[in-house]
Amino acid sequence: MRIDAMKRAVIDALEDVKAKDIVAFNVTKMTTLCDWVVIASGDSNRQTKALAVNVRNKLKEAGAEVIGIEGEAVGEWILVDLGKVIVHIMQPTIRAHYNLEELWAPPPRTRRRASGAATAEPTA
C-alpha cells in the first residue's frame, strides 16, 4: 500500500468514529522509524478503543499490515503501528500532558532581519 493512501485511510478511519483534533506530521527527515505520525483525540476510553479498532480494521481491509497495537487495555493512549505510519490515539488530558505535537512538528523557519537578528516564522 502506498504511503499517501495509507495516511489517507488512517485519517478516514479516525474521522469515521469522530476523532477530534487529527494532525499528521511527515517525519521522514526526523527519524527512520516511520514516515508519518498521526495524532488524534477521543473523549473516553470507549471512544479511543473504537478508534483504534476502526483504524486496524480499515487498514487491514485496504491491504496494509498492522504491526501492533499498544495500550488498548487502558484506552487512555493507544498506539497503532502500521510500519510507515504510527498512529497515537489519546484522551485530551494525556495528549496535553505529553504534547507530542511539539516533539514532531517541524521547527519554525528563521529568517534574518537587516539587523542580523533571527526571527521565527511558522511553517505553512
Image: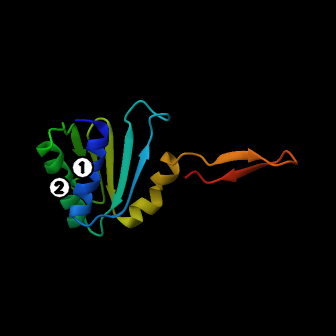
- Circle 1 residue: 9
Residue 106 placement: quadrant: top right
On the rendered structure, is 26 left or right of 62? Answer: right
Disc 1 + disc 2, Cβ < 8 Å = no
Residue lying at the far top in this picture: please name it: 32
Image point (73%, 46%), residue name: 111
Q: Residue at x 13, y 49 (%)?
A: 57
Residues at marks 1 and 2, CA–CA distance in whole angstroms: 10 Å
The picture places residue 28, in percent across and down from the top left corner, at 44, 34
- For the N terminus, give its image quadrant: top left
In the rendered image, the residue lying farthest to the left is: 61
Q: Nearer the viewer, residue 26 or 53?
A: 26
Choose top left, top right, bottom left or bottom right for residue 74: bottom left
Q: Report helix, strand or loop for mark 1.
A: helix
| Residue 102 horizontal side relative to residue 122, left or right | left
Question: Which residue occupies 48% across, 56% down?
Answer: 99
Identify whether 59 is placed above or below 90. above
Q: Mark 1 or mark 2: name the one nearer the start of the chain.
A: 1
Residue at the spot of label 2: 54
Which-is-in-front pick, marks 1 and 2?
1
Q: What amino acid is labelled 2 in the image? A: Asn
Image position of 39 with respect to 91: above or below: above
Q: Position of residue 69 (x, y in %)?
A: 22, 45
